[in-house]
Amino acid sequence: MAKKTIVGFDCGNSSYRVVLGTYDGVRILTEVIDQIPNSMVKAGNYYYWDILRMFSDFKNILKRLVSRGETIDSIGICTWGVDFSLFDRKGNMLNNPLAYRNALGEQQLSEMTDSERKQMFLNTGILCDKINSVYLLKGMKEEMPDVYQAADRLLMIPDILNYLLTGKMLNEPSEFSTTQLMDVNTKSISDFVCRKMEISRNLFHDFGKHGEAIGYLSDDIKAEIGAGYDIPVVCVPSHDTAAAVLAVPARQTHFAFISSGTWALVGTELLKPLLSKEVYEAGLTNELGAFGTITLLKNGAGMFLIQKIKKEYETDAKREVTWEEIVKLSDEERGKRIPLIDMNDIRFFNPVHMGKEIWNYLKETKQAEGGFSWNTIVKSVYESMACSYAVTIEHLQRVTKEYFDCIYIVGGGAKNELVNQMTANCTGKNVIACFGESTAMGNIAAQLNYFEPYLELKTIREIVCNSVETKSYMPDTDTSYLIDSYKKLQKRS
Ligand code: LRH
């Protein structure tokens, strides 16, 4: 394949990035063109995402690329899962996407019995979770009936951007699986879930196929960015987790990964879903990955806690602080007792003040006393993160009957040396931190299949292996004894 210049848009909860990938026949070299902060916008009673600002920023960056002389061969879009907008019959967007941290979903899910939740899992492979789109959609139907009634189509956030760029509507399968509206066995819309949740099946489209073009940049946008040629927008695994897993530089067939960002996704890649009782009880979920694979994973709280803590610490300190300073707070606690929190306790989902919430938790569980300490709080978050990874790796090994001798960490969190080492220590395994923009790498790598449709997943991974820099961490202290304490806290929540 001749040299290709490929754009990957990776939109996360706390920032979005545009990455330019140059494929030279062997590897993909990446350049981050821009990174722009992102956050939910509270308006009235709800939290929303400002999708039009993302779209407009993306167009501006494309324009910059064209004016600096790049010839763009293709574009792919990835974002986080679960959030969506509704569109009317004429293709007009009816609402800004509501953010999954709204209470709407939780209310709907709380009405479901255990046996209903199990049925939903068996049909969709997805664990019932308050953030899944299906609950938010049901909540909208009740709280915003006019918007719901006017809706003709539902598009997930990456689908919306694809539509705004090309005028073509489709639902991309990896992202769609996070709705919990997909039958995991047939990989089509679940009639069972639609019936059960009283949601119109007609809201959804046929699914796109990874590697195929969704369409081309519309004439308007071509003119706006100054491109005098057609640019295809490719159907990539647009769920950021699916793209990040594609970017794991693993040569073995069975591997464990941690995709570490606002969320921490700990899992493994499979060819078929696992729907056993053990999987269900371990809180694992079967999402759709790249090119028809399944990513069996635990969807847990990740850097969100520490991101919030950093902001609060800055408010206290009345200045901006670096990540190094935050890490140092934890390091200063070296040799002291290690306090733990259940990372996924609902009280840490969206508290008014994360630091105070954690401090209260530590006091209630008799792990802290005396005055409020940022050092203790930060230490507890980092160590708990490593423990939660270790517990999930244990579960994954049990349910898949595979032994993982190493764990690949992808995503922004891979830069955190302290957590990498803690994870090696807690799991007793070799941790391989993978640098660079993993989601964008997976996004760009998937687009190669558009130019060469016979390119298999294995070959794409080989290209990834040639392209990604890694650093290895071996266990240097045994902290596996923390796992039992962590499990006790999980039972408490
Ligand atoms: C990670 C992620 C995860 C969650 C979602 C809210 O970025 O995509 O899979 O489902 O964000």
Image: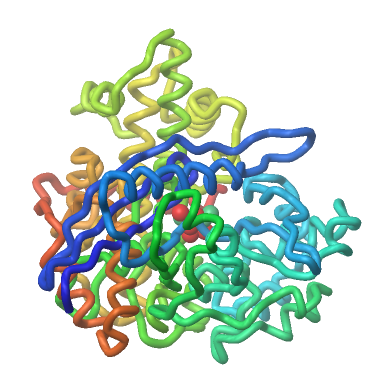
Which image quarter: residue 207?
bottom right
Please name whichever residue, 180 or 481, is drawn nearer the observer in this view of the structure: 180
Q: Residue drawn at (38%, 48%), measured in percent from left and top?
A: 261
Q: Which residue is drawn at 26% across and 53% down?
A: 70
In front here: 121 or 315?
Answer: 315
Q: Is residue 387 visible?
A: no
Q: Is residue 458 left or right of residue 113?
A: left
Q: In which quarter of the image is the N terminus?
A: bottom left
210 and 216: which one is in front?
216
The quarter of the picture where residue 270 lies is bottom left
The image shows residue 187, relative to residue 30, as above or below, that is below
Q: How is the image coloured?
A: rainbow
Q: Is residue 300 visible?
A: yes
Position in image of residue 337 (x %, y %) = 28, 30
Q: In this image, 109 relative to 376: left or right?
A: right
- Residue at left 78%, top 33%? 44
Residue drawn at (90%, 56%), measured in percent from left and top? Answer: 146
Relative vertical location of residue 442 with respect to residue 416 in this rendering, above or below: below
Q: Left of 298 or right of it: where is 352?
A: right
Q: Quadrant of residue 220?
A: bottom right
Residue 342, how many percent across, how many down? 47, 45
* Callout count: 0
> Looking at the image, which residue sits at the far front?
228
Q: Where is residue 303 in the image (x, y as percent from the top left)?
A: 40, 41
